Image (spheres, rainbow, N blue to C red):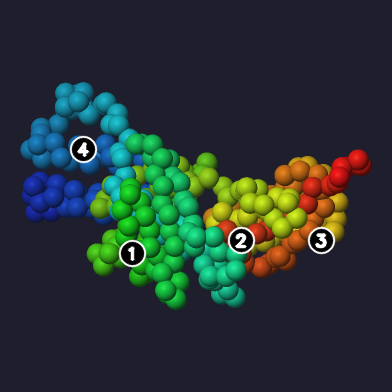
Amino acid sequence: MISKLIVHGPDRGAAVARLRRALADLRVLGVTTNLPLLERITRTPAFAAGETTTGFLEEHGLTKLEEELVPPREAVLLAAAGELSGIGAPDGDPFEAGPWRLGGATRLVYGAADGEREVLASRTGKVSSRWEMVADGEASVVEVVAPLYRGSLRIFVDGRPVAGGFVHGEGGLVWVNLDGVSYRLEGPVPPSAEGDAVGPSGGASLVAPMPGTVVKVMVGEGDEVEEGQPLLVLEAMKMEQTVSAPHAGIVDALPYGEGELVGGGAVLAEVRKRREEGDG
């Protein structure tokens, strides 16, 4: 048992009204609870009238599981703001534009009841808490007005206040509570460095798909590496991802050292293919 919710009032009608309000205000995120069932019970006229029996749930069709709720756009934006507000450090700003910025955008993809929900976020101006986010094909300016604290987050979406709950659950899940309703999202895919860019030497340039911090470097410039050999570890979205050599070769460049912040699209390493004997 996590908790008990007890209300009282001068009569049953007042008590039921308070119970409905209390359930709407109650946030329990990260674990499965029976809150949706309790809310359905309180909305039943028979419950308000006190007409309850041992067969109440069956009689009113309350034993059937409800389909998973599709999160509204504001819930997805709230989740993205919660993720992004946790990135960064007092010593630097990973959203600061630099020579390796690639389009200035961070891409977050959530799994929801209606499929994948993508958010593209880029910081606007010099305010670290304000982003332009594109979700469901629509752009909005999102600003965090109260930092994430004990699972609560307050943001503005195009000037409209939105307040709710946000926590990370087990198995990479993200839970968002909005207007008293909880939504479950599969968290963003752990960041991976993609070797789809070509460096000056014709080798692979591994780029960071989102802002993060280099927490460990295992090789040095000029080192010979084998395919799949770990090069460095990038921490982003509160997860660590090992960046490995896409092919055998020589490390031409390592622009960032341990503890340095990198922006989305930053080149993390360049690996030049090893010239085989007989190659022209």
* Of the image marks 2 and 1, the number of the one nearer the N terminus: 1
Q: Which mark is residue 40?
A: 4
Quadrant containing the C terminus in the rendered view:
top right
- As rendered, which of 3 and 208 lies closer to the eye? 208
Secondary structure state at the residue bearing disc 2: loop
Q: How many marks?
A: 4
- Counting from the top left corner in percent of width and height, residue 193 is at 63, 50
Using a 10 Å C-alpha cutoff, classify the residue at mark 3 as few (fewer than 14 neighbours), some (14 to 19) or many (20 or more). some
Using a 10 Å C-alpha cutoff, classify the residue at mark 4 as few (fewer than 14 neighbours), some (14 to 19) or many (20 or more). few
Q: CA distance from mark 4 to mark 1?
A: 35 Å
Question: What amino acid is found at the position of numbered circle 1 in the picture?
Answer: Val
Report if residue 205 is visible in the image.
yes
Report if residue 32 is visible in the image.
no
Using a 10 Å C-alpha cutoff, classify the residue at mark 1 as few (fewer than 14 neighbours), some (14 to 19) or many (20 or more). some
Question: What amino acid is found at the position of numbered circle 2 in the picture?
Answer: Ala
Q: CA distance from mark 3 to mark 1?
A: 41 Å
In front: mark 4 or mark 2?
A: 2
Q: Which mark is residue 266?
A: 2
Q: CA distance from mark 2 to mark 1?
A: 24 Å
- Counting from the top left corner in percent of width and height, residue 209 is at 56, 54
- As rendered, which of 66 and 128 lies closer to the eye? 128
Which residue is label 1 attached to?
Answer: 141
Q: Residue at x 70, y 55 (%)?
A: 199
Q: CA distance from mark 3 to mark 4?
A: 62 Å
* Of the image marks 4 and 1, the number of the one nearer the N terminus: 4
Question: What amino acid is found at the position of numbered circle 4 in the picture?
Answer: Arg
Q: Which mark is residue 50?
A: none
In front: mark 3 or mark 1?
A: 3
Which residue is label 3 attached to?
Answer: 221
* Of the image marks 4 and 2, the number of the one nearer the N terminus: 4
* Of the image marks 3 and 2, the number of the one nearer the N terminus: 3
Q: Is residue 166 left or right of residue 204?
A: left
